[in-house]
Amino acid sequence: MNLEEIAELEKRVLIPTYDRLPILAVGGEGCYVRDDRGREYLDFLGGIAVNALGYAHPEIMAVLRDEAETLLHVSNLLYHRYQGPLAEKLARLAGLDRAFFGNTGTEVTEGALKLARAYARQHHPAEPFERFEILALENSFHGRTLGALSATWPEKYRQPFEPLLPGVRFVRLHDVEHLRSCFTPRVAALLVETIQGEGGVVEIHEEFLKEAEALCRAHDALFIIDEIQCGLGRTGHLFAFTRFGLKPDVVLVAKPLAAGLPLAAIIASEKAAQAFSPGMHGSTFGGGPLQCRVALKFLEILERPGFLEHVRDVGGYFRQQLEMLQRELAIIREVRGQGLMVGAELSVPGKSVPRDALAAGVLMNCTQEKVLRFLPPLIVERQHVDELIRVLRPILATLPAGEKEGVPA
Ligand SMILES: *Cc1c(COP(=O)(O)O)cnc(C)c1O
């Protein structure tokens, strides 16, 4: 079937949740994905931060082939060789003690919310149970299942499914007074992305995060950091939070963890982890041998000398190139991000940009209407950045200038 036939079929048979770009992907190598006509696209979206090693990475493929012929799945009723070592490694990297494996970001967010409630009950056995509130930040994204969705900011995602989880409050970004006023003895946890991804690559300020951490400590609420998008090398550091010296109780990882396979983890301190006991939580597919073995290989590659340095170097070069473009074209309002998590906010809606870029052979994304978001494989080189900028310049130069600042589009 060709693209038109596939699109026609999907239109009839898929529950209508996605708006796809018109590409029929059939293969890929390195930073390029290939369509059915043999056309190659430079990928600056990376399967939404999943394909951190690009497509068909030879070492990942070798592990996959070997494990596929050995043991695909055994369930969590048995032991296998890879879950323990992976938990140990993730805990060490995050400065924590234990891990639980799920499959997706929203699943481990959900698990962390349950952990927060269990922790509150264990440590504050008040009657009636009141310590169940979750604090999240305005502009946040934590997932699509009902619990994680309750802590996700955009009204348009939440409103159709109300009523959601009771007791979720959104703290105004960088408003320390508001943050303080939200902390009461009812708060079980604060959930935060240190760099908001879907929210448009918004970096949360260090002072605000430090205050949030201190308030969690003072109130014995769990400090949960969502590193699902910004973690595991994306910023040129193993985790985005480490550059501020934060000490979370819980860290969530997912997207790139198994280099393209679904795998996610709750990484927790000993004290937080002890709120769960056998039977309280679980996941049929979570932490299978295939995913865990691939994840161990991914982390091994991530830890090789020079790997994260490369991310910081190319990321710095990328931001520099975007800033040069910004001086040239008034339409770019701000360039933001760390490492290879980069956003360029436009002064006009940018929804047409990904489609135009696609026609010129580049895959990218626009979020929050006006923020061009780039999440390329961490193996991109400066030459790929140059290729992207060459494509982007004429597209942005011909964007209609739009409304004046401050006037809604
Ligand atoms: C993508 C994302 C999630 C949800 O992950 P899924 O695997 O899509 O469920 C949660 N938090 C952040 C920060 C994300 O970027």
Image (tube, grey):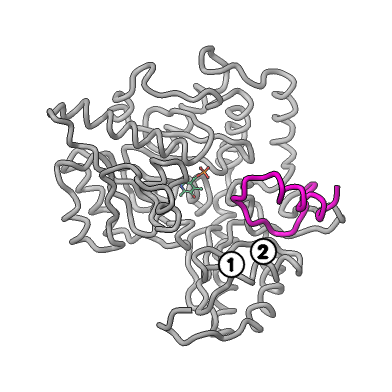
Counting from the top left corner in percent of width and height, residue 384 is at 70, 63
> Residues in magenta?
1-28
In this picture, residue 400 sits left or right of residue 192: right
In the depicted structure, whether residue 407 falls above or below residue 8: below
Number of marks drawn: 2
Which kind of residue does numbered mark 2 sit on?
Arg
Q: Residues within 10 Å of mark 1 (few under 14, many from 20)?
A: some
Which residue appears at 74% of the width and 59% of the height? 22
Which residue appears at 71% of the width and 54% of the height? 31
Tell me, for residue 63, which label it has, or none. none
In the depicted structure, whether residue 70 falls above or below residue 328: above
Counting from the top left corner in percent of width and height, residue 197 is at 48, 56
In this picture, residue 396 sits left or right of residue 344: right
Name the residue furthest front: 12
Which kind of residue does numbered mark 1 sit on?
Tyr
Quickly name the residue at label 1.
317
Counting from the top left corner in percent of width and height, residue 166 is at 28, 43
Counting from the top left corner in percent of width and height, residue 335 is at 50, 71
Sequence order check, earlier mark of 1 and 2? 1
In this picture, residue 268 sits left or right of residue 399: left
Is the residue under label 2 in contact with that under label 1 (CB below 8 Å)? yes
20 in magenta: yes
Foreground of the two, 94 or 277: 277
Mark 2 lies on a secondary structure that is helix
Quickly name the residue at label 2.
382
Residue 109 seen = yes
Which residue appears at 65% of the width and 66% of the height? 354
88 in magenta: no
